[in-house]
């Protein structure tokens, strides 16, 4: 379809030119970072420079170690593997499926109506014997709501626990300061910032002894077996260097469209909380998610109904239910901008969505009375 408008960067962001160039250069060079010959040493240099670049980008130089993984899901899984050394696990109700669906028997910290993790409830959950392993995301992948991770870290550490932070949706949108957050580990992923799919990383506090999830050989200082994806890692570092946050023009355009949508009776999930720019999560009680998606897709606009990690299915949002709005859980639409987005793209989205909603209302006027 010609003239497709891509507004699903929260699912995956197209490969940046800088990342593509870095990928090709590393691929053409060749070499295995574990080899001792000259090409191996060059590959090792690319690997370590990328590691240093990522640590520097999140202010973790000197205090953080970094393990490259196959993506955010594996980074989260590696973090969760550390929970075996703790007495109990707590995850928030807003966690990504790679966290929420990967543990059994965990206590669940609820969300507030604003979409933020209820830290008072978390504090209550921590009032038990033993050391906790807690997982709270920095920015929610559906609503974009930012959690007070630093406060959560102080609560968790008061009980001798480990706080893991899924920062996949925050990277490239807001400044991340690993030291200031006080987290024990932090997961990031390349493809959310235009760095290509299949590469991620777990950053962790070096005061901890990290236990490997994938074993069998000595790569990544023995913490993740398997030959490193040097080209993908080089692309990740190049994409991160090319990130300059969300421009004022895009933020202004998004704010303008949010106001226009609200005038049509649209609910903006998480609007009362601090949110990362570039993610807009809306709900219209009269229009189901699947019908909205069909309308937008037929008009050449790519958006989603929430997390992309649900086997391509449109289903009710667990996050929206957790916010106390089950009536809207199957009526949501997520619009997410990125490095390819222009300010006028927000207007095109609004024009197409609002006209579709108008047609829908006319067709179903009798049913909605």
Image (cartoon, rainbow, N blue to C red):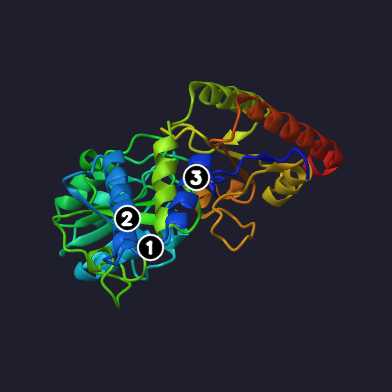
Foreground of the two, 47 or 318: 47
Q: Which residue is mark 1?
A: 31
Considering every residue shown, the one lying at the far front of the view is 38
Q: Nearer the viewer, mark 1 or mark 3?
A: 1
The spot of residue 98 in percent (x, y) is 43, 61
Residue 138 visible, this angle = yes
Label 2 residue SS? helix
User: Would residue 197 be found to the left or right of residue 227 on screen?
Assistant: right
The residue shown at (37%, 63%) is 228
- Residue 149: image tag: none
State the separation of the CA atoms marked 1 and 3.
17 Å
Label 1 residue SS? loop
Q: Which residue is mark 2?
A: 42
Foreground of the two, 26 or 66: 26
Q: Which residue is mark 3?
A: 21
Label 3 residue SS? helix
Please report contact status of discs 1 and 2: CB closer than 8 Å, yes or no. yes
State the separation of the CA atoms marked 3 and 2.
17 Å
The spot of residue 327 in percent (x, y) is 60, 48
């Amino acid at each position: 379809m010609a003239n497709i408008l891509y507004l699903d960067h929260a699912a995956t962001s197209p490969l940046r030119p800088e990342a593509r160039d870095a990928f090709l250069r590393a691929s053409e060079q060749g070499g295995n970072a574990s080899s001792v010959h000259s090409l191996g040493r060059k590959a090792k240099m690319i690997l370590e420079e990328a590691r240093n670049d990522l640590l520097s980008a999140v202010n973790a130089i000197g205090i953080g170690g970094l393990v490259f993984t196959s993506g955010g899901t594996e980074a989260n899984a590696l973090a969760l593997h550390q929970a075996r050394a703790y007495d109990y696990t707590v995850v928030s109700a807003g966690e990504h499926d790679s966290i929420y669906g990967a543990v059994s028997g965990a206590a669940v910290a609820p969300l507030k109506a604003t979409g933020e993790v209820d830290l008072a409830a978390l504090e209550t959950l921590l009032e038990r014997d033993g050391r906790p392993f807690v997982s709270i995301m920095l920015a929610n992948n559906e609503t974009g709501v930012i959690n007070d991770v630093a406060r959560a870290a102080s609560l968790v550490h008061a009980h001798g626990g480990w706080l893991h932070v899924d920062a996949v949706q925050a990277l490239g949108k807001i400044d991340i300061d690993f030291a200031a957050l006080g987290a024990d580990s932090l997961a990031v992923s390349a493809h959310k910032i235009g760095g290509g799919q299949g590469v991620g990383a777990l950053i962790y506090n070096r005061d901890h002894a990290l236990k490997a999830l994938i074993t069998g050989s000595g790569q990544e200082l023995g913490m993740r077996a398997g030959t490193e994806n040097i080209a993908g890692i080089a692309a990740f570092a190049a994409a991160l260097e090319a990130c300059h946050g969300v421009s004022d023009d895009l933020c202004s355009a998004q704010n303008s469209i949010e106001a226009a949508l609200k005038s049509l009776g649209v609910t903006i999930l998480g609007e009362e909380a601090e949110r990362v720019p570039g993610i807009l999560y809306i709900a219209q009680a009269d229009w189901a998610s699947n019908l909205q998606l069909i309308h937008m897709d037929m008009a050449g606009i790519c958006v989603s109904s929430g997390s992309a990690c649900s086997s391509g299915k449109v289903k009710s949002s667990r996050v929206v239910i957790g916010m106390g709005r089950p009536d809207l859980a199957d009526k949501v639409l997520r619009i997410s901008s990125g490095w390819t987005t222009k300010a006028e793209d927000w207007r095109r989205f609004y024009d197409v969505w609002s006209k579709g909603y108008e047609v829908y209302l006319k067709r179903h006027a009798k049913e909605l009375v």
